[in-house]
Image: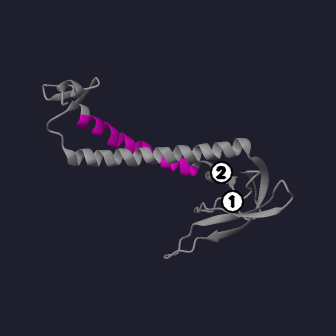
Amino acid sequence: MFSYRNFGVIKNGLHKVNNLRMKTSEISWSWVIFSGAFALVGLVCLGFAYYFWNKNRKLKSSGLETTALVIAHYKKPQIPPSTAKAVVIQFTDNRNQTRVYYSALYTTPVQFQVGETIRIWYQKSNPNEVLMEGKDEWLLPTVLGAFGVVFSLIGLPSLLKELFF
């Protein structure tokens, strides 16, 4: 049975539901969609930033730390060609097996020089999951976090203002 009691009271153009006031008139739905999209992108970026930060934190705290030797640089095959390069490292795992790891982080200038020894962390159960010191630790969570904060600060206040104030 329909009852106004279930939906709150409309007074002065505001609709009150569960002690939240929501506008009932003059809502610009295109602005709500625009603000909602910004807010959603921001929150998703923040979620991924937290995921990658937490993954790196866990790998550093529970993984095995060792040193690795930078043995080469390689370019990402793309058109047009880029000057960004990633490093190839070699390390010995806990089973005394020599492993080679190809970094997925391309930088200009290259992050480490050939012959340089660097600290790495890897999972004992999966030695192919490697975290190198330096930009590999913080670049992705920082960039995603920054985008998340900017998009959230644009989208959330305007969305909330449009819907509730």
Please state the horizontal and vertical placement of residue 146, each as a whole percent of the image: 46, 45
Number of numbered markers: 2
In the rendered image, residue 105, in percent from the top left (x then y), is placed at: 60, 60
* Colouring convention used in this rendered image of the protein: one colour
Can you say which quadrant of the picture contains the C terminus? Answer: top left
Q: Is residue 141 magenta?
A: yes
On the rendered structure, is 81 left or right of 27? right
SS for dot 2? loop
Name the residue nearer the viewer: 132 or 109. 132
Q: Residue visible at 19% across and 29% down? A: 15
Tell me which residue sits at (12%, 25%) in the image.
12
Determine whether 158 is above or below 139 in the image: above
Region of the chain picked out in magenta, as a range:
139-163
Q: Amino acid at mark 2?
A: Gly
Numbered tag placed on residue 134 in the rendering: 2
Q: Are marks 1 and 2 in contact (CB under 8 Å)?
A: yes
The answer to whether 122 is drawn above or below residue 71 in the figure is above
Please say if 60 is above or below 111.
above
| Residue 59 placement, left or right of 32 | right
* Residue 106: in magenta span: no
Residue 112: name its quadrant. Answer: bottom right
For the residue carrying disc 2, how many other residues have a C-alpha within 10 Å: few (<14), some (14-19), or many (20+)?
few
Q: Which residue is mark 1?
A: 112
